[in-house]
Structure formats: C-alpha cells, structure tokens
Image (spheres, rainbow, N blue to C red):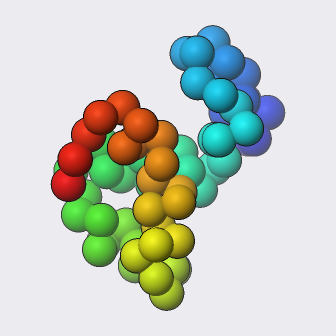
Amino acid sequence: MTTALRRAATTAGVDPSRLTPHTAGATALLDAGVPLADVQELLGHASRTRTLVHAGPYFDRDNSL
C-alpha cells in the first residue's frame, strides 16, 4: 500500500516523504468532515499533537478546523 500511496503522491505533486498510510487516513477522514478529536481516537493517538502530525497534508492545503 505504501508504494501505491507514494506513486499517487508523486503524480499529484505531493512530497511522498510526507505521506504514509496513517497520514492518508487522517487526511481522508478530515476531508470527509470527521472532527479532529474523532480522528485522534480512531488512530489511537494519546495526544492531539500526534494526530496533527499525521494530518499535516490536510492543513498544508490551507484547510482549517
């Protein structure tokens, strides 16, 4: 799965080093309107900061909570 994500990132012009299955999942959930606290719980993160690390690409696109 990681190889496919990296290829898709490269095709989309996204730095593939910033994309992981965890990051892609967080971004997809946020895109779908899932609240950050719920994404945090689904990913099993103890801290909001860790979830924000994985949600980086979402916020790089100038989205906001």
Q: Position of residue 49 (x, y in %)?
A: 46, 72
How many marks on residues? 0
The quarter of the picture where residue 63 lies is top left
Residue depicted at x 55% and y 15%: 12
Q: Quadrant of the N terminus?
A: top right
Q: Is residue 42 above or below residue 20?
A: below
Residue 65 position within the rendered picture, expressed as x and y whole percent measured from the top left: 20, 54
Front residue of this view, candidates 35 and 61? 61
- For residue 49, say whether it is visible: yes
At x 55% / y 51%, what residue is drawn?
23
- Residue 53: horizontal and vertical position, in percent? 53, 60
Residue 11 as seen in the image, left or right of residue 26: right
Farthest-out residue, right: 3
* Residue in the image at 41% along x and 37% along y: 60
Decide: is 1 above or below 51: above
Residue at image location 48% in from the left, 48% down from the top? 56
Q: Horizontal placement of 60 versus 65: left or right? A: right
Q: Is residue 25 visible?
A: no
